[in-house]
Amino acid sequence: MPLFKKRTAGKPGEWYYCLEHGVVEEGPQCRAADRLGPYGTREEASHAMETARERNEEWRTDPRWNDDAGAGGEGPKTG
């Protein structure tokens, strides 16, 4: 008996964006490393890349994480 069961079908109403295929899927159809989600609606999942870009930009320019906000996005300072 396997320790972890591979989930072959997702729940209805769970939406994912597959990075490998560039499509929206209902339920996880591709491996976790290749998808974003879950999202509550198909519409939200269809904007996954845009949402990710916006969040990355917010993080990159957040002064709590980057003392040189806007100076190349070097990430958190470590010392």
Image (tube, rainbow, N blue to C red):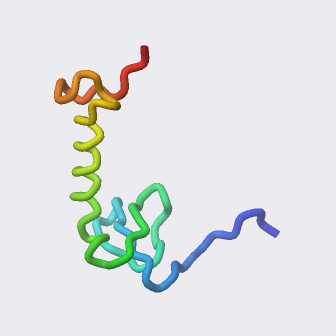
Tell me which corner region of the image, top left, top right, bottom left or bottom right, holds residue 68: top left
The residue at the point 27 percent across, 30 percent down is: 63
The residue at the point 54 percent across, 79 percent down is: 9
Q: Position of residue 34 (x, y in %)?
A: 42, 58
The residue at the point 24 percent across, 30 percent down is: 73
Above/below status of 42 relative to 59: below
Q: Position of residue 36 (x, y in %)?
A: 39, 61
In the rendered picture of this protein, how many numbered marks are placed on residues? 0
Of all residues, the one furthest to the bottom in this rendering is 12
Question: Which quadrant does the C terminus fall into?
Answer: top left
Above/below status of 64 relative to 42: above
Task: Please indicate whether residue 37 sits to the left or right of residue 43 in the image.
Answer: right
Of all residues, the one furthest to the front in this rendering is 64
Tell me which corner region of the image, top left, top right, bottom left or bottom right, holds residue 3: bottom right
Task: Please indicate whether residue 77 sits to the left or right of residue 47 in the image.
Answer: right
Question: Which quadrant does the N terminus fall into?
Answer: bottom right
Q: Position of residue 55 (x, y in %)?
A: 28, 49
The residue at the point 38 percent across, 71 percent down is: 39
Near-viewer residue (24 or 52): 52
Near-viewer residue (25 or 76): 76
Q: Position of residue 18 (x, y in %)?
A: 36, 65
